[in-house]
Amino acid sequence: MPASTTRMLFTTLFFFFLSSSIFLASPVVAQTWTTCNPLNRTDCPHCPALSTNYTFDFLTSTAGPTWNTTAGALSYSEYNGAQFTITDRGDAPTTQTNFYIFGGEVEVWMKAATGQGVISSIVLQSDDLDEVDWEILGGNESFVESNYFGKGNTTSYDRAVWHPVNFTPQNDFHNYTTRWTKDEIEWFIDGASVRVLKYAEANGGKNFPQTPMNVRLGIWAAGDKDNDPEIVKWAGGKTDYSKGPYTMSIKSARVKDYSMGKEYVYGDMTGSWESIKIVPGNSTIEKQLNAPPPLTASQRWNKLSPGARIGIGSALGVTAILLIVLAGIYCVRQRKAGRKERAMADLALDNERRELNAYQMQMAKGGFASGLSRLDYVVRVREAPVARQDVIIFFELLLSIDRSIPVTSSLPRQELWE
């Protein structure tokens, strides 16, 4: 089977399993899959319409709520925008829009990833597997590929076209644009048209992409050693993960929808552009994208009426006065509590001094009376309500030095450790 046909069949089947969480352990990843094919079912969800022209700037923000990361994880840089990185087998970071366009333009500023067998891709795809592609091989510095498929048809393999370039796609950012109408598809590189596909040229229109499509950006290792040999050959050879990581960078993506409406609905199971119904109304996606940013605090203040400002200012003033009063009461109470604690500490110190003087006087008279041991004295001191531990330790030290005083105690031995 030819490489182009094998690749389309393989990646489409793979992502069907990926979306069903059945084949997550596989190292092979691309961007082509569908969760509900309107050619086979009549209950597929409607397609939310973009219904406007919008530029997503990945240098200043993330993709936002209108994009959904379907595989792996993205990082962001103020210099290189969205970063899609392959580090190990199975890595295939991919993001896609939550909206669809029915005819339109997709313009992406991309720096492709390096790495043999690593594919950087920009994909437009519909739920019934119409597809328009840009694919850049990490090991090919001279050509980029454009491609398309209709309804997942892989019976022929003459769709891909390799375009020579006078730059290295992996070194710098370049503009890759697709313009799509019901009559033709045109591919542009840095503003220059490189290919035009007419409706009739796609198998009489049967393979011409013509149903609402979303936008998918991602990177995958087609050169993984477990892939079909034809896929690996098309990708330029096996991927060596030890030489990675391999990163594709996206600065911005401009998406323009040529149709206007709330959403797009498949009217039957033919998959023709004539069968698509445009539901009238305002696009919720457009409303979300064009909603003004949240007001800053100063902007909200400026929007208040003079009366509201006076009321808020008065309330803040009263609150400030109450806080000051409460703080003053707290300080007064703390000062009173501090004076009380100081008085108690002074009383304790006076008692300790009296005890020490009494001890010194007793020692000057020749020691303690018969029957009063050192330990008995310490116990008496300890029972004093205002005695401090450091003074007790000092007494015990003095007593232990006086070897002439007999060591006797009326206390049981086990109480000596209490």
Image (cartoon, rainbow, N blue to C red):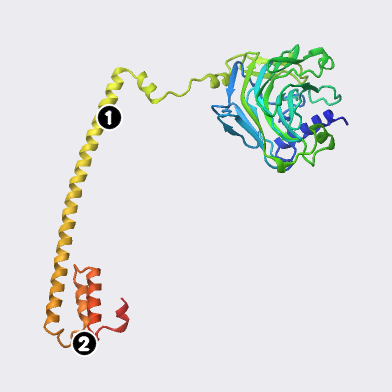
Q: Percent position (x, y) of residue 316?
A: 27, 29
Q: Nearer the viewer, mark 2 or mark 1?
A: 2
Which image quadrant for residue 20?
Answer: top right
Does residue 30 sit above or below 264 in this rendering? below
Residue farthest to the front, as pictured: 166
Identified at 58% across, 21% down, the residue is 285
Q: Residues within 10 Å of mark 1 (few under 14, many from 20)?
A: few
Q: How many marks?
A: 2
Residue 375 appears anywhere in the view: no
Residue occupied by mark 1: 316
Q: Between disc 2 and disc 1, whose residue precedes?
A: 1
The residue tagged 2 is: 404
Circles 2 and 1: CB atoms closer than 8 Å: no
Looking at the rendered structure, the kind of residue marked 2 is Ser
User: Residue 105: x, y in percent?
Assistant: 67, 16
**Residue 323 in which image quadrant:** top left
Q: Which mark is residue 351?
A: none
Q: Mark 1 is on which residue type?
A: Leu
Q: Residue at x 64, y 16 (%)?
A: 257
Q: Is residue 327 above or below residue 66?
A: below
In the current view of this chain or complex, which residue is farthest to the top? 183
Compute the Cα span from label 2 to label 1: 76 Å
In the image, 26: left or right of 376?
A: right
345 relative to 308 in the view: left or right: left
**Is residue 53 among what the camera can see?**
yes
Nearer to me, 203 or 115:
115
Q: Disc 2 on helix, strand or loop?
A: loop
Point out the image quarter for the C terminus: bottom left
Query: What residue is at 19 percent from the left and 79 percent from the top?
Result: 377
Q: Position of residue 231 (x, y in %)?
A: 81, 34
Helix, strand or loop at mark 1: helix
